[in-house]
Image: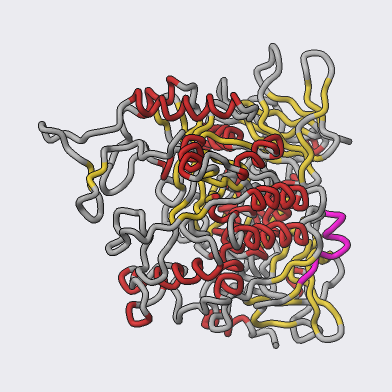
């Protein structure tokens, strides 16, 4: 491919577009360049604010970096190039000769993200101002997507490089990348190739020129060429990215952390983790089984013809033994979300013995446990199931009838008491209601059961699970807060791989193929099938990889929300384990040992979401002040607001007398939610020399 190769990309891509090809003189400062800091002030260590400047051209690459900054809590200012009212980027916009608070020169941004190496045009005053600013204050610049050419430290692609589709490309972190900003990765970065019908990635690979250090490369012919690297020249540093991406693609998600670490030189507000927790609902209770002939679930009210055909799925003692063994093998703990009363009812109906419950109780210390109410009733309005879909029953005055506060409170209390009497350790503040009931359920019940908040308070519940597909944001329910959970497409009413494939086919194929037609009625549904899956192989060959890919997307996006499935998925064919094995196995090949999956409790997730909301609000209201002066970082936030701060290993936190080690080690850095110590008004961190 030659120097004009970028033209082809715009027509080929769905998710990304080819970058503009800048002039060869784009990096040359004009006569209007901002003047550097005067010599008399050069010896004074400047104040550098912990905020990022993003120049936005509306492209997917910039949007991806903005998403990373936003999701991890890094403050940023976005300048939209296409806006007629945008500020002019000049010396006054970027810096102050003397900061009123510290008396020092002040850099208002610790890093700059541009769409490419010069989005303003050849010889522009704005690029000249940025060049002078970056040189004077040692500020780094990310070129979000550009092409391989000498202006960014690379040879043209016709000299040992490549330009074209990158789907399926097996790139790798170089030795310099592993010892630098990408040391948290295991090494290989494979570009997504989810469909043979759609080009998903396009980019350029070039040979490094002097001053360029490659961090990510891939095979080209008998050699390798760079896709991402650092270009140091004229007193400035640029991180050059020569492939297009969006915020959801795995190759970007793997690199996003390192891009931010490089940009901020490892010192920034915000923090990121890779979270994964799995809640197993309905433990001790049976689940109703899908009927492959009726295409519904006998036992549910909306299953015409299902009377007398009810069948149940429930774990056995052998399934319980396997669950404990699997946990040990994978070093991963499941959350058992249990209904003790439903289990007691099952035992009474089946001869008074229950080997499965006995086995789970014998292994009780191996799991985390969460209250799921005693018998799993619907805790919202009284359901009128004479209609399909059901509706809320009304009293004589035409008002909605709800389950009472005392009934809800008893369901929570009795389940907790049963567990503690049998030595199960659980946190009283956590609750998952059956079907997330009690919370608003659209369209039938547009508000929470007004009796729910009081019943939660009666039992000390502070964290109540909600369904992320309905309510992705945390919200208050009286004195409690919701913890949204991701549903997984491993169905509660299936015990075998074949049943899973059959129900999946019914939901996601056309009416002509014997399906429900939901995709015909809702063409934007992402999991629709062009043809039905093979019932014998469809689950393992298509559904498992797809569900693992969706779950991995959440894991790599700093999303702490847990996933949820049901006890039926640990029974019979044990359909859940292939999905979890693929998620955990893939993760451990992608990441180094210093970046483990964080498998935390529902309460800890609730606290994390609560802290994020408070932090984002404080940042949005411009109530946070944070800056670095040499080796000292200062962070001031409103009283009661903890700040997320990420810094290098070896950083110490200033106490009233002396210092202490700061934060928790993760991905080669130290980070934590932190606030001022005793008799302090701000957080002060001492960076390692």
Q: Position of residue 507 (x, y in %)?
A: 40, 68
Range covered by the magenta-colored residues: 171-180
Query: Looking at the picture, does residue 294 appear above or below residue 401?
Result: below
178 drawn magenta: yes
88 drawn magenta: no
Q: Is residue 6 left or right of residue 491?
A: right
User: Which residue sits at x=40%, y=75%?
Assistant: 509
Query: Looking at the picture, does residue 393 appear above or below residue 312?
Result: above
Query: Looking at the picture, does residue 580 appear above or below residue 161?
Result: above
User: Which residue sits at x=38%, y=39%?
Assistant: 377
Q: Position of residue 595 (x, y in %)?
A: 77, 49
Q: Position of residue 366 (x, y in %)?
A: 71, 39
Q: Is residue 520 visible?
A: yes
User: Which residue sits at x=67%, y=59%?
Assistant: 583
For the C terminus, the quadrant is top right
Q: Position of residue 237 (x, y in %)?
A: 77, 57
Q: Is residue 27 left or right of residue 341?
A: right
Q: Exactly how many numbered labels are in the figure?
A: 0
Quadrant position of residue 376: top left
In the foreground, 99 or 17: 17
Quadrant position of residue 405: top left
In the foreground, 32 or 142: 142
In the foreground, 75 or 455: 455
**Residue extending furthest toward the left:** 397
In this picture the colour scheme is secondary structure
**Residue extending furthest toward the top:** 679
Q: Is residue 76 visible?
A: no
User: Which residue sits at x=71%, y=47%?
Assistant: 324
Q: Is residue 488 left or right of residue 230?
A: left
For the N terminus, the quadrant is bottom right
């Amino acid at each position: 491919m030659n120097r004009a190769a970028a033209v082809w990309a715009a027509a080929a891509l769905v998710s990304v577009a080819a970058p503009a090809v800048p002039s060869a003189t784009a990096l040359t400062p004009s006569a209007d360049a901002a003047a550097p800091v005067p010599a008399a002030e050069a010896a004074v260590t400047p104040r550098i604010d912990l905020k990022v400047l993003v120049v936005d051209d509306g492209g997917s690459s910039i949007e991806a970096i903005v998403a990373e900054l936003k999701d991890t809590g890094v403050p940023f200012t976005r300048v939209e190039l296409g806006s007629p009212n945008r500020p002019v980027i000049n010396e006054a916009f970027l810096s102050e000769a003397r900061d009123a608070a510290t008396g020092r020169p002040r850099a208002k941004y610790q890093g700059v993200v541009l769409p490419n190496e010069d989005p303003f045009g050849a010889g522009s005053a704005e690029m000249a101002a940025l060049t002078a600013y970056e040189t004077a204050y040692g500020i780094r610049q990310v070129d979000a997507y550009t092409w391989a050419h000498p202006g960014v430290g690379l040879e043209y692609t016709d000299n040992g490089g490549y330009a074209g589709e990158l789907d399926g490309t097996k790139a790798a972190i170089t030795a310099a990348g592993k010892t630098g900003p990408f040391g948290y990765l295991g090494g290989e970065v494979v570009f997504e190739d989810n469909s043979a019908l759609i080009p998903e990635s396009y980019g350029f690979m070039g040979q490094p020129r002097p001053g360029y250090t490659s961090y990510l490369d891939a095979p080209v012919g008998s050699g390798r060429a760079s896709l991402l690297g650092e270009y140091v020249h004229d007193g400035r540093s640029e991180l050059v990215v020569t492939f297009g991406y969006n915020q959801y693609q795995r190759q970007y998600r793997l690199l996003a952390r390192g891009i931010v670490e490089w940009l901020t030189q490892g010192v920034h507000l915000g923090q990121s983790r890779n979270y994964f927790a799995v809640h197993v609902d309905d433990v001790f209770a049976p689940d109703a089984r899908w009927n492959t002939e009726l295409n519904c679930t006998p036992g549910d009210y909306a299953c015409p013809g299902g009377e007398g055909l009810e069948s149940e799925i429930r774990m056995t003692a052998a399934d319980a033994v396997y669950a404990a063994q699997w946990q040990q093998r994978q070093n991963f703990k499941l959350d058992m979300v249990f209904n003790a009363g439903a289990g007691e009812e099952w035992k009474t109906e089946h001869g008074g013995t229950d080997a499965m419950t006995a086995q789970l109780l014998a292994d009780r210390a191996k799991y985390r446990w969460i209250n799921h109410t005693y018998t799993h009733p619907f805790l919202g309005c009284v359901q009128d199931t004479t209609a399909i879909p059901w509706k809320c029953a009304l009293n004589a005055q035409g008002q909605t009838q709800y389950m009472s506060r005392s009934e809800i409170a008893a369901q929570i209390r009795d389940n907790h008491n049963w567990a503690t009497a049998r030595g199960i350790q659980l946190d009283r503040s956590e609750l998952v209601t059956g079907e997330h009931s009690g919370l608003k359920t659209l369209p039938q019940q547009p508000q929470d059961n007004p009796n729910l908040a009081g019943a939660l308070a009666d039992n000390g519940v502070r964290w109540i699970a909600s369904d992320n597909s309905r309510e992705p944001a945390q919200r208050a329910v009286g004195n409690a807060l919701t913890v949204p959970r991701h549903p997984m497409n491993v169905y509660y009413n299936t015990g075998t791989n074949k049943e899973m494939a059959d129900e999946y086919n019914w939901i996601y194929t056309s009416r002509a193929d014997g399906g429900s037609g939901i995709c015909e009625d809702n063409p934007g549904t992402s999991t629709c099938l062009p043809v039905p899956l093979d019932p014998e192989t469809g689950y393992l060959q298509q559904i498992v990889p797809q569900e693992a890919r969706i779950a991995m997307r959440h894991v790599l996006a700093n999303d702490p929300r847990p996933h949820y499935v049901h006890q039926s998925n640990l029974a019979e064919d044990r359909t859940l384990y292939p999905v979890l094995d693929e998620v955990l196995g893939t993760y451990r090949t992608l990441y180094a040992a210093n970046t483990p999956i964080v498998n935390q409790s529902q309460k800890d997730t609730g606290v994390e979401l609560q802290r994020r909301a408070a932090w984002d609000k404080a940042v949005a209201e411009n109530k946070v002040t944070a800056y670095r002066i040499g080796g000292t970082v200062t962070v001031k936030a409103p009283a009661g607001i903890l700040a997320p701060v990420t810094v290098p290993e070896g950083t110490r936190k200033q106490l009233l007398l002396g210092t202490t080690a700061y934060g928790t080690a993760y991905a080669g850095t130290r980070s934590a939610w932190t606030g001022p110590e005793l008799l302090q008004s701000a957080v002060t961190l001492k960076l390692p020399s």
